Amino acid sequence: MSSDQPTLLNFLSTCRWAESLSVEELRRVASEIIEKQIPSGGYVCRRGEAVTNWIGVIDGLVKMSNLSSEGKLTTLTGVPTGGWFGEGSMLKVEPRRYDIMALRASRVAFMPRATFNRLLDTNLGFNRFLLVQLNERLGMFIALIENERLLEPDARVARSLGALFNPVLYPGIGRQIQISQEEIGFLAGVSRQRVNQALQVLEKAGVLRIDYGGVTVVDLPGLQGFGA
């Protein structure tokens, strides 16, 4: 781990679900979490596996996707640094219903089910966090369906990027993200070449600025509502 990367404990202390935990409980949670390094293109978890962990992205970018029986790949969403996912599957105790793949080398935290259930049973703040998280996730997936069916490529790129800057699901991400055009294409379901065209349109519209290796959001509401 390089000196500029946060320790697991420091990362956890920035998570909203940990705000109501005592220092002792936070240290206990940190000691129970397993941290893994996932290479670019590697799987964080696979569809059909037993759900035994709640998962957070310490650093990196992962995508949630499914492969149909006909071989069609559908990307559902991306999860950037600071995001946690899989709470719905943890609560329902069912096999995982999607694949999670790292779009770049990523540090990932795996909270065991026993730890998750202890927090669920004993911490009111953790429960409130999960309610907000699930509600926000539901809204995001409803918007995803609308985007896929109704929007043209420029707007799909805008909305896919805008989803990564959700202040509830991914607090602390700021307004700048390192992401390649290929990675954006995976999230939006368009080619890298089409992403390049869309980014030019979005920059001219004043909602983002194209940076070397990423983008900076200039107008977040405009980005998230582009094409409406």
Image (cartoon, grey):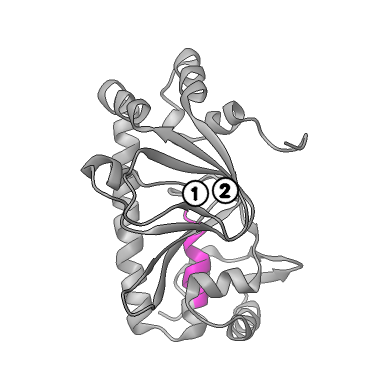
**Residue found at x 28% / y 47%:** 88
Whether residue 222 appears in this view of the structure is: no
Q: Secondary structure at mark 2?
A: loop
Classify residue 50 as left or right of residue 59. left
Whether residue 206 is in magenta: the answer is no
Compared to residue 102, the image places residue 187 above or below, namely: below
Classify residue 29 as left or right of residue 185. left
Q: Nearer the viewer, residue 175 or 119?
A: 119
The C terminus appears in which quarter of the rendering?
A: bottom left
**Coordinates of residue 141 in the picture (x, y in percent):** 33, 63
**Coordinates of residue 183 in the picture (x, y in percent):** 59, 68
Whether residue 163 is in magenta: the answer is yes
Q: Nearer the viewer, residue 228 or 214?
A: 214
Q: Secondary structure at mark 1?
A: loop
- Specify the label residue 146 is tagged with: none
What residue would you read off at disc 1? 170
Compared to residue 42, the image places residue 10 above or below, namely: above
In contact (CB < 8 Å): disc 2 and disc 1:
yes
Callout 1 environment at 10 Å: few (<14), some (14 to 19), or many (20+)? many
Three-letter code, disc 2: Thr
**Residue found at x 62% / y 56%:** 175
Compared to residue 94, the image places residue 25 above or below, namely: above
Stretch of the chain drawn in magenta: 157-166
Tell me which secondary structure the magenta stretch mostly adopts: helix
Identity of the residue furthest to the top in this view:
24
Question: What separation in Å lies between label 2 and label 1 (alpha carbons)?
Answer: 7 Å
Q: Which image quadrant is residue 115 in?
A: top left
